[in-house]
Image (cartoon, grey):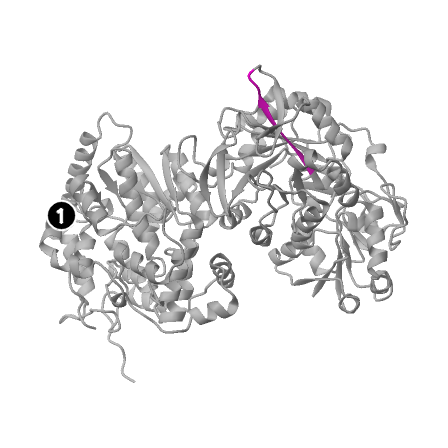
Amino acid sequence: MITIVDYGMGNLGSILNMLKKIGATGQISSDAAVIGAATKLILPGVGAFDAAMERIQQSGLRPVLDARALEARVPVLGICLGMQLLGESSEEGVLPGLGWLPAKVLDFRRRIPSELKVPHMGWNLVRQRCKSHGSTSCIPISCSARSRLTASCGRPTVSNSTLAYNAATSSACSSIRRRAIASACTCCPTSRKSDVLRVRVIPCLQLRDGALVKTVQFKKPAYIGDPVNTVRIFNELEVDELAFVDIEASRLGREPNWALLREITDECFMPLSYGGGVASLATAERLFNMGFEKVIINSATLTTPGLIAEIARVFGTQAVIAAIDVRTNWLGRAQTASHSGTRTGDMTPDRWAAALEAEGAGEILLTSIDREGTWRGFDVRLTASVTAAVRVPVIAHGGCGTLAHMAEVVQQGGASAVAVGSLVVYQGQGLGVLVNFPERDELARRLGGAA
Amino acid sequence: MTELRVCARCVYDERTPGVSFDGEGICNYCRQVDQLAEQYGTGTSRGEAALQAIIEEIRRAGRGRKYDCVVGVSGGTDSSYLLILAKQWGLRPLAVHYDNTWNSAIATQNIRKVTSALKVDLDTLVIDNAESEDIYRAFLRAGVPEFDASTDIAFAQTLRQRAARHGVRYILEGHSFMAEGLAPVGKNYFDGGYVRDVHARFGERPLRTYPNLTFWQFMKWALVYRQKFIRPLWYVAYSKADARRVLEAETGWQYYGGHHLENRATAFLHTIYNPQRFGLDNRNLAIGAEARTGQISHEEALRRLRTPLTPDPELVTYVKKRLGLSDDQYAQLMSGPVRTYRDFKTYKRRFERLRPFFFVLAKANMVPMSFYLKYCFPQRAS
């Protein structure tokens, strides 16, 4: 039995799901006795280094973890932040790490000049640079063959990539190795121009009253189907990532539909983000525990100032997507909106995006209300104005009708990812409901990057 | 122990409802298929000519319209292949799909691949997921074997409704009595009245979006809209294996490994619910048909029937989750008393009384011939 350590910071649900998917049995535990008897350990982690170390100390699990890893020498897999914790220290924090590996975690952004946007999420291929570590004590997890990234593990520094410690023979690790999700590991990109990150194509699915719907310009929600079954279909289509947005929660001041979200995370094998009614740190934490990788926040940025900063401080910037909904007013000026488009903000989208980035947003989900559900193509000018104003990845959303639209907003708008709605739930404009996803090689041909 | 008597051609045995064997040891269902093949000229030039005449009629009636017929699709073999045929015949079909929200990815992908390769538009009716679950729960609670009846009924109603909406009078459906036989009416029967009564007695929420094919709807489509229900595969030679090869080569369509397994509700019905709760193995329909048409030997058919069913264990988990059933509740629903359609209000009597009327409608292709043969005769005691 593989034991996933619950010390209060991690996407526990999604790791358990991955184990289920590869046919391994796992359990989540915060009980010292259970962990003390574990034969394999997974140390998850989403967020900030210091916050995680603090929580480990507070949990009282430190002695038993040390004993398992250093004395019993059970295989340990550290994922994402959990990997960073294995080292002696990290440039992302001031507290000492667990020190199980004689390594320091360095921030590659300070060393490698790169235009690449981080945090990067999605499927990637990582190459192992240093053989000696691979066979003995640490293995960089290679992610599913997608675009090109390089992970390095040259001693004494360990790049921020997922490592497995003392795990060469662990079946859990080798299985995960075959099919790791890159959201579980951030990697060190090379500076070579030829290395292209694959553009993520993210189905953005709207929830209302426990059902899946699709709106046009934030109005006229049309019924699409059952969310859980649709998730299963997207699972089998191996989409990069899914975003769920409850289109009513914020406007009606509701909590997320927990029962439904639990069912969704149980079914889902790809990184998931959720938006709608995320108005407190506690709500975000519950979502992360459930298995969501990222929370999407729009309305609460106005009603609860400082929320993004608070979540980013604890869970890391990569866990926070700031949503900006934009509508063109009658003067032709772009205006930001919130609460399902019912309230208007006073900042221009680019300045608003920059402010949210400064607060700690790791990604911007930029939606054009005017284009949403229309199949007319993304608002490229709007996207370009926002991508120019921020360094974090921007997900363009609203209006995608063809693959050419995607290519356009990536190449001319500078978007790092695209979110699509109608395209993946209808056969075509004005036609029937049909959950689908573009063919991989077709996407690669249009958007670049390996399929 | 006495051996069960088995038809010398197909694999139906004495347990099949309403079965009888003639002097040559061949069952009445094989003879019925022979009769139909004779009547429709299936796979002969006479059948081809009859179908060509119908196609000509469809084309003529559809002049000046965007579509001249609707074709019901499920992502399965027959309906997907029918779409290819319809295009070859020069028809301008609109594909219509009834989504019971239990589709597998392979089914939706198949619909996408086939409709995009053939450039056919798709219209879909998706039932409200909560209603769909309520109906399925009601059938489980009722303890009747027709777990998925609501889908078949709604599919028929959706086809007719969408045909009416698009101003089309011709409905094509991918059934083939050669490839599937006609299901013996025995323990299994269903119609719109049955779905309504089972749900009225065991459901919880009102049905608002469920497209039920009630008796009067059925009459309206036939008599007022004068819709024609055509099953082209009754006229032409058809083999599922060949159809699959063509589909794979021309559209990238994928096989899902068994009759009806493209939908999770039907997969549950065929691999878990019917075998475990009622001791019914529905594979005999397709396997029997293959033996009957000589595609596999009689021995091979019997061998296949003896291979145990291999249900996907994950499917039970999924069903429990979708229907909101605890392990105990599920276990209870899988035991408990069993009922049949005779314990509910159905249209069966009415159909039987109106048999001469339906004979005329079936002859005119206004209701399916299989409907007439199955629904309008009293069931023989078995």
Name which residue lies at 35% across and 66% down. B142
Question: Can residue B98 be seen here?
Answer: yes
Residue beneath disc 1: B361
State the residue at coordinates (27%, 68%).
Answer: B343
Furthest toward the top, the residue is A331
Q: Position of residue A331 (x, y in %)?
A: 58, 14
Vertical relation: B312 (above or below) A204: below
Residue A121 relative to residue B331: left or right = right
Q: Chain of mark 1?
A: B
Q: Quadrant of the N terminus of chain B?
A: bottom left
The residue lying toward the viewer, choosing from A217 and A162, is: A217
Q: Main secondary structure of the magenta part?
A: strand
Q: Nearer the viewer, residue A265 or B120?
A: A265
> Where A187 sits versus A377, above or below?
below
> Could you say which quadrant of the image residue A8 lies in?
bottom right
Q: Is residue A87 left or right of A230 when viewed as pictured?
A: right
Disc 1 residue type (three-letter): Leu
The picture quadrant where one finds residue A188 is: top right
Please tell me which residue is depicted at 75% across the width and 66% down the height of the picture: A39
Q: Callout 1: few (<14), some (14-19), or many (20+) C-alpha neighbours within 10 Å?
A: some
Above or below, B166 relative to B381: above
Which span of residues is magenta-colored?
Answer: A321-330
